[in-house]
Image: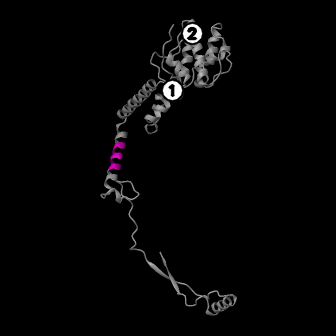
Amino acid sequence: MIMSVAESPKKAGLPREVLKWLLGLELSFSPKNPRRDFSNGYLVAEIFFSYYPDDFPVHNYVNGTSLLTKMSNWSQIERSLLKQNVRLPKEVIEGTVHCKPGAAELLIQEIYVLLTNRRIKSLYERDADFTDRGYQGKLPMVARATASGAIKSNLRLSEILADPRIDKNKQKVQDIIHMHQVQRQTERMENPRHFLRQRMEKRASRFSAASGQQKGPPSQCSGWTFGLSAPPLRSTAGIRFKEIRVKQAARQSTSRASEGLAHDGDAPQVPTDAPPSHFRCY
């Protein structure tokens, strides 16, 4: 039996009926963050152990966080499911291992439908999408990610470590860039005024920069980027000089001090005919 791939739920978290079902299985710990708690496959093995105890011995699984532990647990789960003629979608497993948004929630709902033979209203027969497209759509256009931000958000480091083939990772990057370009084109069609205003602002800034260019050779732009006008130097024509008069000490105290220095040694006497003033520049 091959499980169908459904669309990731629009709301974060699991439905209430699925949570009640998980609580009734008496797992080793209650999952609080599905994206983190189900990524290593340990709780998934415990869920299948409740229905197939002979094929899913819990002592063979490790509750760890390393990539090797996750890959080992999930490979054992897939081998055990083949004995029951059950196959989980590969893209859903990879999305759960690499903590993609919505992957773990979708996987648990699919397992719930498989083991209980019940239906969930939030599941639809559509392609799985484990990107941040839904989250970006809720943000304003000025706060949405750029192309590099989209690559960083949708391509995990664990994916590169699990499959280090350059051609495979290159194809993933190209798919993310293509998705980003389609989103930008859709935004331009939905709100053309916003992008028209940005285009006019860029043209205005380029025109103002071009009008302020220097016509001289690049050597005349000492220390400044070629093509931008340097700030004008301050002219010295407006500088004025003001004479400041300094009040000198009395001649008697000056002569007494000079006589005392002469008795102490051959120190030079203080001249009494010093210039009465000096100039200060403002």
Q: Is residue 20 left or right of residue 195?
A: right
For mark 1, give the secondary structure: helix
Q: Is 29 situated above or below 3?
A: below
Q: Is residue 202 magenta?
A: yes
**In the image shown, does 88 or 257 lie closer to the viewer?**
257
The span from disc 2 to disc 1 (Cα, nearest Å) is 26 Å
Question: Which stretch did the figure color magenta?
Answer: 197-206
The amino acid pointed to by label 2 is: Leu
- Residue 97 visible in this rendered orientation of the protein: yes
What coloring was used for the rendering?
one colour
| Residue 201 percent coordinates (x, y) | 36, 46
Q: Is residue 118 left or right of residue 213?
A: right
- Residue 17 visible in this rendered orientation of the protein: no
Q: Which residue is mark 2?
A: 81
Please tell me which residue is depicted at 64% across the width and 90% down the height of the picture: 258
Decide whether the magenta segment is chiefly helix, strand or loop. Answer: helix
Q: Is residue 272 magenta?
A: no
Please tell me which residue is depicted at 65% across the width and 6% down the height of the picture: 54
**In the image shown, does 263 or 143 lie closer to the viewer?**
263
Q: Which residue is mark 1?
A: 160
Q: In this rendering, which labeled residue sits more in front, label 2 or label 1?
A: 1
The amino acid pointed to by label 1 is: Ile
First in sequence, mark 2 or 1: give its number: 2
| Residue 137 percent coordinates (x, y) | 45, 31
